[in-house]
Image: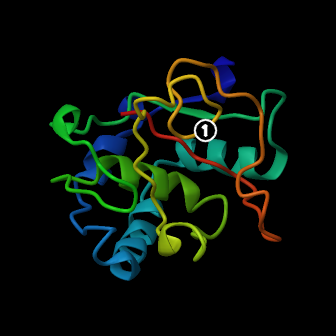
């Protein structure tokens, strides 16, 4: 698994993330333009690992970007679907930078009006369900957005 891990602290990822100040919920067009310019600045070690995973995958089917910068003050933010009252967008920026190496980032009009980032929190009464609200069961293997003819090739998760 260690070859599937990219340690962001060793590669100056944190300083690049700090350059991103655009709110992706209010201005996704400019956010993604800025992400493209930032992703071009990634160190070659990260770019090579992401590109290799994109082309060849690996036995586990995952790649882990460890030591990402932390989002501060999130423990007091219960974010309903489709809304974020966060002050920074570190998690969205990290996800978007990595995703930019795997293809286009998109959302489904049928789900939360097409937003790209879903802030999911455990929900009371759904702790044992196999869904976004579950928190006390391991999520079993499944396909995201199986209802749609254009299912995603990759799913990126950022745990806060």
Q: Quadrant of the N terminus?
A: top right
Question: Where is residue 27, by image quadrant?
Answer: bottom left
Measuring 57% from the left and 57% from the top, which residue is drawn there? 99
Residue 93 appears in the rendering: yes
Q: Quadrant of the C terminus?
A: top left
Measuring 42% from the left and 73% from the top, which residue is drawn there? 32
Question: Where is residue 92, by image quadrant?
Answer: bottom left
Give the answer, above or below, for where 4 lies relative to 28: above
Image location of residue 114, percent across then percent down: 52, 73
Judge the density around disc 1: few (<14), some (14-19), many (≥20) Cα neighbours within 10 Å. Answer: some
Q: Nearer the viewer, residue 93 or 49?
A: 93
Image location of residue 107, percent across then percent down: 57, 69
In this rendering, position of residue 124 left or right of residue 134:
left
Give the answer, above or below, for where 75 lies relative to 51: above
In this rendering, position of residue 1 left or right of residue 18:
right
Q: Given the current orientation, which residue lies at the most extreme front position?
A: 125
Measuring 20% from the left and 56% from the top, which residue is drawn there? 85
Q: Given the current orientation, which residue lies at the most extreme bottom position?
A: 29
In this rendering, position of residue 27 left or right of residue 118:
left
Circle 1 SS class:
loop
Q: Nearer the viewer, residue 87 or 80?
A: 80
Image location of residue 123, percent across then percent down: 42, 35
Image location of residue 10, percent across then percent down: 40, 30
Residue 72 appears in the rendering: no
Q: Nearer the viewer, residue 44 or 36?
A: 36
Question: Where is residue 129, by image quadrant?
Answer: top right
In this rendering, position of residue 17 left or right of residue 51:
left
* Residue bearing mark 1: 131
């Amino acid at each position: 698994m260690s070859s599937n891990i990219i340690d962001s602290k060793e590669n100056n990822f944190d300083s690049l993330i700090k350059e991103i100040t655009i709110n992706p919920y209010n201005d996704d067009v400019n956010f993604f333009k800025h992400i493209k310019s930032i992703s071009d600045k990634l160190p070659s070690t990260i770019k090579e690992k992401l590109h290799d995973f994109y082309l060849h995958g690996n036995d586990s089917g995952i790649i882990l970007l460890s030591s990402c910068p932390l989002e501060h003050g999130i423990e007091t933010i219960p974010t309903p679907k489709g809304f974020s009252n966060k002050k920074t967008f570190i998690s969205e920026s990290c996800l978007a930078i990595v995703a930019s190496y795997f293809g286009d980032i998109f959302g489904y009009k049928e789900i939360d009006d097409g937003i790209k980032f879903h802030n999911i929190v455990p929900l009371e009464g759904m702790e044992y369900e196999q869904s976004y609200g579950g928190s006390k069961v391991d999520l079993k293997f499944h396909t995201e957005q199986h209802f749609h003819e254009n299912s995603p090739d990759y799913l990126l998760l950022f745990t806060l």
